[in-house]
Amino acid sequence: MKGCNTKNYCTLRIYLVTAFLGVCFVIVIARLYYLQTLKQENFIELANYQHIAKTKIHPKRGEIRDRSGKALAVNVEVESVFADPRYVEDPHLCAYHLTRILGVEEKDTFEKLTRKKSFVWIKRKIDLDVAEQIKALNLSGIGFRKEVKRVYPNGRLLSHVLGFTGIDGEGLEGMEMSMDGVLSGETGWRIVSKDARRREVWHCMPLEKPAVNGHNIELTIDSMIQYIAESELEAAYNERKPIWAGIIVMRPKTGEILAMATRPTYDPNNFQYSETDERRNRVITDIFEPGSIFKPLSCAAALNEGVVRFDDVFYCERGAYRVARHTLHDSHPYEYLSFPEIIAVSSNIGTAKISMNLGGEKLYRYLSDFGLGQVSDIPLLGEAKGIFHHIDRWSKLSIVCVPMGQEVSVSALQMLKGFSALANNGLLMKPYLIKRIIDEHGNVVQSFEPEPIKQVVTPKTAKMINEALKMAVRKGGTGIHADIPEYTVAGKTGTAQKAENGRYSHTKFVGSFVGYVPADDPELSIIVVMDQPKGQYYGGVVSAPVFREVARKVLKYLEILPEPERIPLTQINNKMGG
Amino acid sequence: MKTILGIILSAVLCFVALSLVMVYSTSAIVAQDRFGCENFFLKKQLTWLGMGFLSFLLFSYCPYRILKPLAKVLLCISGVLLVLPMTGYFGHTAGGATRWLVMGPVRFQPSEFAKLAIIIYAADVLSRKQDEIKDFFKSLLFPSLLIGCMLLLILEQPDFGTTVLMGIIVMLLYFIAGIKVSYCLLFIFNGLVAGIVAIKMFPYRMKRIAAFLDPFADPKGSGFQIIQSFIALGSGGLFGVGLGQGKQKLFYLPEAHTDFIFAIIGEELGFVGTSVVCSMFLVLFLCGMLVAIKCRDPFGKLLATGITLMLGVQSVINMCVVTGLLPTKGIALPFLSFGGSNLMTNFIAIGILMNIGMRGNEKVVSNIIKHRDANQSGRNTPVRSLARV
C-alpha cells in the first residue's frame, strides 16, 4: 500500500533530519569546548583588558599657611565639564549652550563635540553654580567631574613666595614648585572593574593602594607683617616707579623671614594673565651691586681684626683720594672722621683707608663668612649666588671698591642675611622660610629651628658697629628718614651706581636701605631695595621711609614696648659738614 | 510515551527556572539603568510566563486535531497581524525593525505567532495531500505560494532570522512528508538565491556576514557583538565566573538578556553550564522527534515534527550564532531568552506537542484512518478514549 510505504519512507527521513540536527548540537558542544576551555586564556586576557582598569586616587594637596596657621594656599572643590562625543546628540545646540554659559569658543567646542573620541575636556575648574546651570539643561554626552582647584585666598599677598600650580595641581612656581614633593603627597591607585560605559563597578575585593595626602606647610611668614610690608612697598613703588622694588623682613636673632615682597607682582589665582617678569621673586633671584649698605660689613671686619679701633680718626682727603690711578670721591668733602662717623656719613675714602689697613686676604675671608657668593639655601628655587670674585681675581682697585659695595653683587636676601649677623651680636643665622611641616592630622612631620652658621665677628665688634649704625640714622646721618621717634634704629643707606656697558652710570642707581630695630635688642631687620627709581634716587630718600613705616607698624603689631629715653645726640654731629 | 512527555516537561521547567535566574542576572543592571527598576524585565518575563503556562495548559488539554480545520483561519489571522504594524497604526519600532504590534499594554511580535500558524498550515496541507505529494505542482504549488507570501511578510517586518528559520522548517517538513529529493534540491537552491538577494538588498546584513567571517577585522563595529560574545564564553572557562558575577552584561554585550543570553550563561556557568543547556535542548529535540515518530496520525506526526524542529532549529541557530558558527541574526533561544511573544509561542508549541503525545494514537473516525493499520494503533490506545473524541 502506498500510504504504508510513504510512512516508512517518512520515518526514515525523520531519522535523517533528527540525526542531522543532532550532529549540529554536537558541533555546538564541540565549539563551546573549543571556545571555553582551549581558547579560554585568550579571551580571559581580552576580558581583563576591557573590564579591569587601574584608576589613580589623587591625594589632597597640602595647604600653605602662615606662622599662625592662617591659610595662604587652599584647595577648593570645583567641577570640570567634559564631553563624550559618542553620546552627544546635537553638537550644534550643545556647543551653543556651552558657549553661552561657559564663555568658550563656539567653533572649538563644536569641533571637540564632533571628535571621534570618547572623552574630551570642555572646560576645567568651573564654579559649582555654573556647573548647575549646565546640569539643568540635561545635555546628553556632557558629563562632570569633581576636581580640586588651588586657591590663594589673599590674592596677590605673598604671591612670589607661594607661587602657583598648574591645571593638574602640579607646582609651577615658588613654594608650590620647590616643595611640590611635600605638598603633593603620593598618588594612590585602585584596580577596579568597569562597565562598558567606563563607570566603576562595585568589586568585592578591589586592590588598592590609598593615596597619601600632602603635608601642610607652615611658613615663618606672618601674614599681617607681610601685608604691612606689601602695602608700604606698593605705595613707594607707585610713587618712585623703579624697575622693581623689594622688601624682606627678618628676625635677626633667629633668621626667620617674616615678610618677603617684590613689586611688580601678580595674582597667583590668575597667573596666566601675568608676565614672567612679574612672577619673578626678585629679592632672591635678582642681584645688584649693594653700594654703601655693604660698608658696615667691611668695617666690622677691620674692627674685629683690631687693625682699627672704634675711636680712630681718619683723614678723608677733602673728598678726593687718588688710589691705583683712580680718584675716589665722597659725596661731600670731609677732613677728619672717626670710625663711626665714616659709617654714619658713608665716606668712601674713609672706608677705603680702613680696608687698606685690613688687607685683601682678610677682607675676603670675612666677607665670605658673611655669606657672600653663597646661596642661603632657603626653600625657593632660583636663588642667586651673587657675584663675589675670588681674591686671586681681585685687581689693585678691588681693595677699595669691594668694601664699599662695588665689584660685588648680592641678592637682597644675601645682603640682609649678612647684615643681620651684625644685629645678632656677630652670629650669622641661616635665613629660613618654613616653620614646620605638619601632616593632615596635625602631627608635626618636621620642625625647623634657628640655625646659627658662624660667629663672624665678636659681640664686642657688633656692639661697636651697632653704635655707628645708630648714628647713621640720626640727624646728620644719611639715613635720617629711617628714624622712628619711639625706637632706636640702626641702619645704613646705600645708593649704588648701576654698571652700564662696563662703566658706572651717573643716572641709574639702586637706592637701598638696610637696618634693624630696636637697635639694642633687635626684633626686626629689614632691607628695602629700589632698582632705578625715577626722580629721587638716594637710598636715604626712596628706601629709608619704607623701612621706617614698616618698622613702626610692625613693632606696634608685635607689641614691642617703645624705648623710654632715646640716647642724646653726641657732639660728633656738629663736626659733620653738608 | 509518558516517560518521553515527562522528560519534555521537566526539560521545559528546567529551562524556565534557569531562564528566570539568567534573565534577572543579565538584565538587572540594564533595567536599573534604563528604567530605574532592576526587576523590570524579570517582572515582564514572569507575566508572560504566567500567560504562557495558561496557554500551555489550554493547548495540552484541548485536542490538537481541532487545529486542523482551523489551520487556514489561523494563517489568515497571523497574515493580518503581520500586515498591521506596516500600516503604522499599531506598530512599534525597536532596533530599526517594526516587529512589534502594540495593543494597549500588550506588545507582541506577530511573526512569532505566524511561525506556529505556518507550521500548523503546512502540517495540515501535507497530511491532506499525502497521496499526491510526489506531484508537487499539482498538490503543493498553491500552499507553497501561500507560505511564501507569509515568509515575505515576515521578511518585511523585517525579521530575517525568523524568515530563514521558517524557510528551513517548512522545507524539512516537505522533505519529511515525502516530496521528491530533486524538488528539495530545487528548494534549497531557490532559498539560497532568495537569501543572497535579501542579503544584498540590505547592507547591514552584508556587514553581519563580513563580521561572521572575520569578526576581528572590525572589532569596534560589526564584529563587536560576536567578539563580546566570545569574551563572555571564553572568560567563563570550564566552571564559569559564578552566577551573577559576569561582567559582559554590563553594557559590553548587546542583547545580553535576549538573543545572547547563552553567552552570559557561558560566562557565569562555564562550559559545564553551556554543555548541559545544549544537551538539554538536544534531549528536548530528540524527545519531540520521538513523539512525532510514535504518532500515527499524519497531521499529528507532521505537526509534532514541525514544532520540534522549530524549537530544535531555533536553539541550534541561536547557539551557533553565539558561538560564531553562523552570522548574527535576531533569533532568540527558546525558553531562555527574554521575550514575551517568543515564550508564549514556545509554550503553546510545547502544549500542542504534549497533546499530540497523549492523543496522537487515538482512533478517530475520519477518512485518514482508512490508511492506517488498525491493529497497531489499537495496541497503544485504550478503547475508552474513543468516547472522548
Image: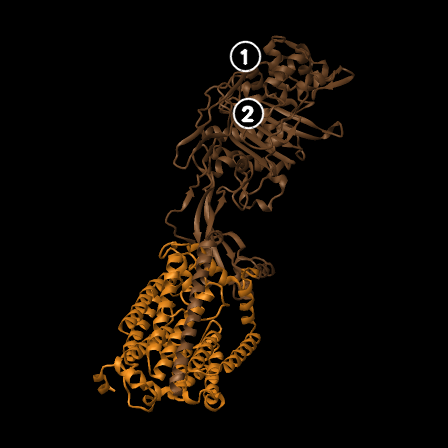
Viewer-side residue, B366 vs B277: B366
Question: Where B298 falls versus A569 (above or below)?
Answer: below
Question: Is residue A557 in sight in this rendering?
Answer: yes
The quarter of the picture where the N terminus of chain A appears is: bottom left
Residue A432, x across and y down, in percent = 51, 27
Q: Colour of chain A?
A: brown
From the image, tell me which residue sits under label 1: A458
Label 1: chain? A
- Residue at x-position 54% and y-position 63%: B221
Closer to viewer: mark 2 or mark 1: 1
Q: Amino acid at mark 2?
A: Asp
Q: Which residue is mark 2?
A: A483
Inspect this view and state whether residue A130 appears: no
B99 or B192, nearer to the observer: B192
- What color is chain B drawn in? orange
Residue at (55% x, 64% y) in the render: B213
- In the rendered view, does B194 fall on the left or right side of B12? right
Q: Secondary structure at mark 1?
A: loop
Q: Amino acid at mark 1?
A: Thr
